[in-house]
Amino acid sequence: MIYQYFDELDVEPIPRRYIRNMEDPFEKYNDNTFLKHYRFPKLIVMDQLANLLESVKKKSMDMLLLNYVLNVALKYICSNLWIYPKSTMCA
C-alpha cells in the first residue's frame, strides 16, 4: 500500500539502516583515544551520563506517582458522581 504511493510519486523508499556489532566506547578506547574521538575526557562523559540517567529515573518515578494519584482521584470522583462502589470502577 505504501509502495504504491511511492510509485505514483516516482520516489524511491529510503533503505533502512541497521546498527550492528555496536561496541562500548568506554571499554573499547583508552583515555587518550577516547579524548581524540569525542573531544571530552572519559570520566566527564561518564559522570554526565550518570547524572542524566538519575534525572530520567527521577522524572519517570514522578510520572508513575502522578499517574497513580490521578487514577485514584478519578475513581473517587466517578464513584461519587454515579454512586458506584469504588471497587467496581475500572480506572
Image (cartoon, grey):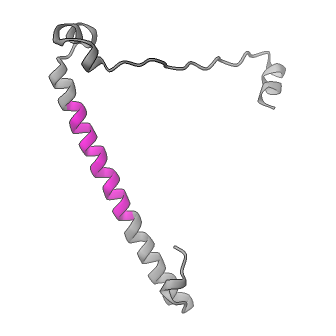
Work out whether residue 36 or residue 19 is closer to the camera in this orientation and state it.
19
> Would residue 60 appear left or right of 15 to someone viewing this image?
left
Marker count (numbered)? 0
Say if the magenta span includes residue 58: yes
Work out whether residue 49 or residue 7 is closer to the camera in this orientation and state it.
49
Q: Is residue 40 above or below residue 1?
A: above
> Would residue 47 appear left or right of 72 to someone viewing this image?
left
Image spot of residue 58 (x, y percent): 27, 51
Occupied quadrant, residue 38:
top left
Which residue is at a point 42% across and 77% down the rendered structure image?
A: 73
Say if the magenta span includes residue 49: yes
Which residue is at a point 26% across and 38% down the rendered structure image?
A: 52
Image spot of residue 8 (x, y percent): 84, 21
Work out whether residue 9 or residue 54 is closer to the camera in this orientation and state it.
54
**Which span is picked out in magenta?**
48-66
Which residue is at a point 31% across and 44% down the rendered structure image?
A: 56
Q: Is residue 21 above or below residue 61?
A: above
Image spot of residue 7 (x, y percent): 82, 20
> Would residue 59 appear left or right of 5 to someone viewing this image?
left
Q: Quadrant of the N terminus?
A: top right
